[in-house]
Amino acid sequence: MDVRLDQEVIHTAQAHEGPIETDAVIVGAGPVGLFQVFELGLLEIKAHVIDALPYPGGQPVELYPDKPIYDIPAVPVCTGRELADALLKQIEPFGASFHLGQEVSAVEKQPDGRFHVATSKGMRFLTKTLFIAAGVGAFQPRQLKVEGLEKFEDSQLFYRVKNPAEFAGKNLIIVGGGDSALDWALNFAAEGPNRAENVILIHRRDGFQAAPASVARMRELCERLEMQFIVGQITGCEEKDGRLSAVKVTGPDAVTRVVPLDLLLVFFGLSPKLGPIAEWGLQIERKQLVVDTEKFSTSVPGIFAVGDINTYPGKKKLILCGFHECALAAFGAVPFVFPEKRVQLQYTTTSTKLHKVLGVESPVFD
């Protein structure tokens, strides 16, 4: 992914002796976490961002970087990668520090009201506010449970596509019936530099939880013998010379067939896990953090939750809803960061103060 971060800022933060004192820590560098940086920045609140992934962008970049997104306001269409790049450019004026490839392992409230935040890499923060924008939590792909298959993970068995070029010219089996499985099957069956030698889609039934247009396109390619679809489940595997050579597919007729392959892609969806968040003393409902809809505060004052990690009456898990939550959460943080300061709502269109914060020239109106 072509994302530029200030490596010097990251290095300086990691070399810091003792806890880093800050106004805000954001857990999660997905689209909502990145936009939280922006909303806090408009209120002159500096933030540090922590994410378990080694790069910003969150779930859209990790799972579907090249898949089009159509419901971002004023952006007719963009990919997950393009959305992350645009958000990173938007928050550049605020100089947020990123701490990637690590999880928040502990959060403890201090006598002075601040929070001590520790990460899996030994970093420590003392922050006035904490924003949890961790999506569905520490999501992990659901695995294909077949004896002997796990040893081929990351060599011939994959649960996500990081580099499509690795699959070009290969005999490829894709397992799953959702959008990810269909999208990648169509991608690797299409003409282009990443086209596979052969694509076989396997799903346990002849019905899909995917876009109807994708299903229709898949069936069309099968009729033209440009890919194959097999109804069944993988029940075993074969290896030769230490490499995975084939999988055994048992169909609804109870007949098991051996299907040769080079690489295996599995898309069974994600298993959301709150991980350490569950131990932070926050009110949780169905693995989500309960918040109010005035400030998007959790049950612990000073800790806010935005995006898919939270729940409230009428909650909709949409990126644009998360953006709205970020604005209200930022204003909710002001009393904790600037207890003596009264902040009025200003507009980026007309406020010379916000223009200065953003580093842009104020327009002159006749």
Image (tube, rainbow, N blue to C red):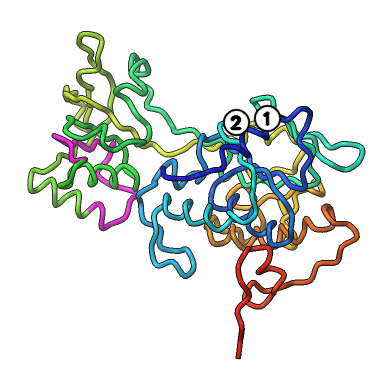
Say if 29 sits above or below 349 in the image.
above
Give the side of residue 350 with respect to residue 257, left or right. right
Pick the residue in front: 322 or 39. 39
201 part of magenta stretch: yes
Mark nearer the N terminus (2 vs 1): 2
Please report contact status of discs 2 and 1: CB closer than 8 Å, yes or no: yes
Name the residue that disc number 2 marks: 102
> Image quadrant of residue 344?
bottom right
Q: Secondary structure at mark 2?
A: loop
> Residue visible at 66% across and 30% down?
14
Name the residue that disc number 1 marks: 119
Say if 364 sits above or below 175 in the image.
below
> Residue visible at 53% across and 52% down?
88
- Residue segment shown in magenta: 194-215
> Residue visible at 85% across and 66% down?
342
Pick the residue in front: 92 or 75. 92
* Amino acid residing under circle 1: Thr
